[in-house]
Image (cartoon, rainbow, N blue to C red):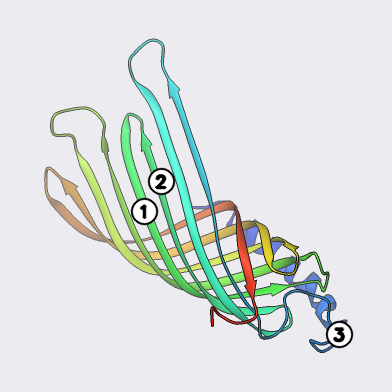
Amino acid sequence: MFNTKPRILFIFVSLLLISIPLLSQNQQDSVSVKTPFRKGRWITGLSGSISSGSNSLKSSNSGINRNQYSIDFRTGKFIKDRLLVGGLISFSRDKSDEFVKRTAETLFAAPMVMWYLADGEKGSLFLNGAGGYVSFRDESGLAQGEDPPLILIDGNGFGILLGFGYSYVLHDRVVFGLGLNYNNSWLSADVTETPENKKSKENFTVADLSFSFGFSVILDKFFF
């Protein structure tokens, strides 16, 4: 289980409640608002994260290697000032080579809502949320032996993403964003154990907390 889940949800709800007065104080139309996040505009961009590390043991030839990365593609339209509705596709991969080799891949596709909290010309804090389809595959097994035991988990289900961060805008067009994201997925998967070829059906959850960064472009029209 992901022990910090209640804490993350509490932080997200607290930010949401704090931001409500900010929204109620601004009832101006798009003509007078200075924000670059104006009604009718589109925003499209990529974000993600990557990490790699290794550790070798002097007493043996073994070591630990780990590589992680994630890529998010997001696009949407502002249906009103500072309120974006769109969608996202996210792919992540986690590979480790230790005493146990493991490769996990996750694909997440969902509609998305983003709410920018301020009218500043140079940027704003934001909250975002998404809920949709998740595909998950996890393969793990012992790193030694001619025919080592292997466990394959292959499933799909429903997932959510909650996040907050800050977007900095250059020249009313280019956006650089930093965010903290919480993902939680409820999955149903086929589990296969080899070489016994034992198969079963399992229900489980997968959760993680991650930082992301990326660039986006603001357009008055969506490429047309």
Specify the quadrant that holds the C terminus.
bottom right
Q: Which mark is residue 5?
A: none
**How far separated are the C-alphas under marks 2 and 1?**
7 Å
**How far separated are the C-alphas under marks 2 and 3?**
47 Å
Residue 202 occupies quadrant:
bottom left
Q: Which mark is residue 32?
A: 3
Question: Could you tell which of marks 3 and 1 lies nearer the N-terminus?
Answer: 3
What residue is drawn where x is 38% and y is 37%? 96
Total numbered labels placed on residues in the image: 3
- Does the residue at mark 2 contact the one at mark 1 (Cβ under 8 Å)? yes
Vertical order, 156 against 196 (above or below): below
The location of residue 199, given as percent across then percent down, is: 17, 56
What residue is drawn where x is 19% and y is 38%? 149
Question: Could you tell which of marks 2 and 1 lies nearer the N-terminus?
Answer: 2
Name the amino acid, label 1: Glu
Could you say whether the residue bearing mark 2 is in a helix, strand or loop?
A: strand
Residue 25 occupies quadrant:
bottom right
Name the amino acid, label 2: Asp
Residue toward you, 39 or 57: 39
Residue toward you, 184 or 114: 114
- Rate crowding at label 2 as few (under 14), some (14 to 19) or many (20 or more) other CA atoms within 10 Å: some
Specify whether 147 is left or right of 58. left
Q: From this viewpoint, is residue 10 visible?
A: no
Vertical order, 104 against 41 (above or below): above
Vertical order, 143 against 85 (above or below): above
Give the residue at the far front of this rendering.
224
For disc 2, the marked residue is 94
For disc 1, the marked residue is 105
